[in-house]
Amino acid sequence: MPEANPQESQLTQCVTPPSTRLVLGPQFMRVYANTTRFGASINDMSMFFGEAFLVGPGEITTEERVCVTLSLPQAKILAGYLAANLLFHEIYNDSIIQPQKGSFTAQFAGVDTKLPVDQLIAQICEIVRAGSESAKR
């Protein structure tokens, strides 16, 4: 019987993740949000989640409830994960339609909110790239 290769055994140990058990911590909280606001620094990105309420005729108040700050690499992974899951939802269900008003900042006012999520993201990326290129000049 051939002997096990010690290097192969070490490699297997390195790439085999340990079993993981997820538990809810004592400060875990679940919140509903229908608004998000973003902030960024050179090292990380913050996402503020809140809920907007109509408090009077034409008057909306947004109550921010929680902020999550991620490293930029983790934020990029999250963006891909969200895009993939939204696309998966649209493939197997129906297109998620954004309301025509109040969906995006003025920078993205020309975005077609009826596009499937992959095309919507591509259109937003084009706008951002164009803005970045003109800012460099």
Image (cartoon, helix red, strand yellow):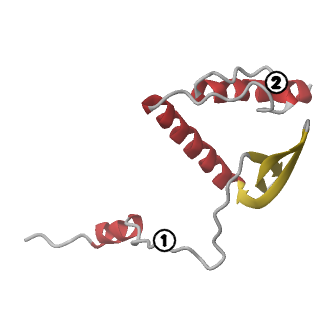
x then y, percent, for residue 63? 83, 55
Q: Is residue 117 above or below residue 71?
A: above
The residue drawn where x is 74% and y is 22% is 111
Q: Is residue 103 left or right of residue 29?
A: right
Q: Residue 109: which numbered mark, if any?
A: 2
The residue drawn where x is 28% and y is 73% is 6
Q: Is residue 137 left or right of residue 47?
A: right
- Tell me if residue 50 can be seen: yes
Badge 2 density bin: few <14, some 14–19, many ≥20, Cα 10 Å: few
Helix, strand or loop for disc 1: loop
Q: Residue 22: which numbered mark, if any?
A: 1
x then y, percent, for residue 123? 69, 23
Helix, strand or loop for disc 2: loop
The residue drawn where x is 49% and y is 36% is 89
Q: Is residue 111 above or below residue 9?
A: above
Residue placed most toward the observer, 66 or 108: 66
